[in-house]
Structures are given as structure tokens and as C-alpha cells.
């Protein structure tokens, strides 16, 4: 199954991705995670993308597209994958379609998770991530048992640099301008599944599974 998770920043894409990849045994491809790993590793790519990310802007299409092209041809993607945070512009979506069509493949479904702005801001600002294993917490909605420490691996929790009020507002603005048009793009292809992201994360997951069946 080849799936895309679409939705505004902070809506819960990464949270749902963790449950989806477990249920359907497909790899999780998060362009945001790939960039953060490159920034942490101080790679050339990391140096190129860091400023865009810290400002809440999109990384240029050519950089993102080439990373995804290289990733989806890997052996673990042959039976499917879950794209999270990609595509984010119509140009990226077109490049993905073109690349898949060269391999005689298509996207099966696009899961579009939505919630209103105040929910997105509260979720993003309260997000905390484990430095070691990448597990995601929320100070109010999914707190770690011990403050600042990952339940799963004992790693230290941190707040993303782009999860400040100003940057989250900028990211939402960028989403509305550049990414939201993809809802229409995939609806026209008959691939869109709309899911209410305001519910509890388990309910959102149940709705996704129902929609995929
Ligand atoms: P995205 O990948 O879309 O930016 P995340 O999955 O990282 O979003 O979720 C953002 C924050 O909101 C995280 O702290 C996460 O724990 C929390 N969260 C995710 N889904 C829900 C939900 N349904 N209800 C409450 N909090 C949620
Ligand atoms: P995310 O982890 O999905 O919230 O993404 C964090 C940041 O990474 C975004 O605000 C962008 O700066 C960058 N990014 C991730 N995916 C993309 C993409 N598909 N296109 C452009 N920029 C991206």
C-alpha cells in the first residue's frame, strides 16, 4: 500500500504514522525527520535546509524531491510506504506522480487529517521529542511519566526549534498557501480520505483504518 499523510503542522501526522506503519508493515518516510537527522549529523544537506526550517519556510522543491526519489526506490519500499509531510507543494506532487509512473506505480490513498488553527498551535507548542529514539510526547495530551525523560528509552526530551508560537503560525500560513491546494489535487484523482483530527489519537487512528478498508 502506497499512502500519503496530508495535513497542517501539528495535526498529528507523525503520531498516526507510527500506528499506521505498525499495522500495515510499511516504512515511514518523513521528510521532516530526514532533514532533522541531517541537521543533527551536520551534513551538507543539513546545512542547506536548517535556515528554511527554523524560519518555518518550505525547503526548496528540488532538494526534497531528490531525497524522496532516492528513498522510494529502496528495497524496503517495494511493497509500499507511508509518506508523511511530502508532498507539500503541487510541484512536489507532480514530481512524485512522474517518478511513480516511471516505475508503473501509483499512490493508493491520501489520508487528509484536519483540525482548526488553535488546536494545531496547542499541539505543536506542547510537542516534545526524544533526542535518542524520536518518540513524540505532548506536555498535556501525552506526557512522559517522568518529566523530560523518554518512557521508551530514557532519552532526554527536547522541543523542536520550529515549535515556537511565531514559527508555528508561519508554518500554518505556509501550509494554507502552498500545501492546502493538494487537497483538491488528490480529491480530483479520487484518492482523498478526510479524517477529523480533533479527536483523541486512538479514535483518529480507528477512523483512518475504517477509511482505508
Ligand atoms: P505532525 O506530525 O502533524 O506535525 P505530531 O504527530 O507530531 O504532528 O503531533 C503534534 C503534537 O500533538 C504531539 O505532541 C502529539 O503528541 C500531539 N497529538 C497528536 N495527535 C493528537 C491528538 N489526537 N490529540 C491530542 N494531541 C495529539
Ligand atoms: P515536519 O517535520 O513535517 O513538520 O517538517 C518540518 C520542516 O521541514 C518544514 O517546516 C519544512 O521546513 C521542512 N520540510 C519537511 N518536509 C518538506 C517538504 N515536503 N517540502 C518542503 N519542506 C519540507
Image (tube, rainbow, N blue to C red):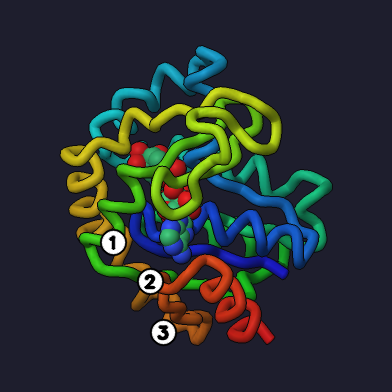
Q: Does the residue labelled 2 lie within 8 Å of ligand 1?
A: yes
Whether residue 52 appears in this view of the structure is yes
Distance (Cα) linking label 2 and label 1 = 7 Å
Residue 65 on image: x %, y % = 50, 44
Report helix, strand or loop for mark 1: helix
Assess whether mark 1 and mark 2 are in contact (beta carbons under 8 angstroms): yes
| Residue 125 in the image: above or below residue 184 | above
Q: Mark 1 points at which residue?
A: 119
Q: Distance between the residues labelled 2 and 3?
A: 25 Å
Work out which quarter of the rendered image holds the N terminus and state it. Answer: bottom right
Q: Which residue is drawn at 34% across and 59% down?
A: 8
Question: Closer to the camera, 171 or 96?
Answer: 171
Which structural element holds mark 3? helix
Q: Which residue is drawn at 62% across and 25% down?
A: 155
Query: Mark 3 = which residue?
Result: 188
- The kind of secondary structure element at disc 2 is loop
Residue picked out by circle 2: 198
Q: Select label 1 or label 3 by which is in front.
A: 1
Image region (quadrant) for ligand 2: top left
The image shows a total of numbered marks equal to 3
Residue 32 disc label: none
Amino acid at each position: 500500500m502506497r499512502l500519503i499523510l496530508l495535513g497542517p503542522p501539528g495535526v498529528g501526522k507523525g503520531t498516526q504514522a507510527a500506528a499506521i506503519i505498525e499495522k500495515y508493515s510499511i516504512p515511514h518516510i518523513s521528510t521532516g525527520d530526514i532533514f532533522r537527522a541531517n541537521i543533527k549529523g551536520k551534513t551538507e544537506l543539513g546545512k542547506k535546509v536548517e535556515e528554511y526550517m527554523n524560519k518555518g519556510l518550505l525547503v526548496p522543491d528540488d532538494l526534497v524531491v531528490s531525497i524522496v526519489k532516492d528513498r522510494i526506490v529502496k528495497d524496503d519500499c517495494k511493497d509500499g510506504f507511508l509518506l508523511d509531510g511530502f508532498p507539500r507543494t503541487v510541484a512536489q506532487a507532480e514530481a512524485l506522480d512522474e517518478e511513480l509512473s516511471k516505475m508503473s506505480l501509483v499512490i493508493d490513498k491520501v489520508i487528509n487529517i484536519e483540525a482548526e488553527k488553535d488546536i494545531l498551535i496547542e499541539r505543536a507548542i506542547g510537542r516534545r521529542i526524544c533526542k535518542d529514539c524520536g518518540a513524540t510526547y505532548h506536555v498535556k495530551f501525552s506526557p512522559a511519566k517522568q518529566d523530560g525523560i523518554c518512557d521508551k528509552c530514557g532519552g532526554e526530551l527536547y522541543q523542536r526549534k520550529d515549535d515556537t508560537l511565531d514559527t508555528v503560525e508561519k508554518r500554518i500560513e505556509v501550509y494554507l498557501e502552498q500545501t492546502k491546494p493538494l487537497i483538491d489535487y488528490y480529491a480530483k484523482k479520487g484518492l482523498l480520505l478526510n479524517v477529523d483530527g480533533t479527536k483523541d489519537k486512538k479514535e483518529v487512528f480507528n477512523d483512518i483504518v475504517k477509511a482505508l478498508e
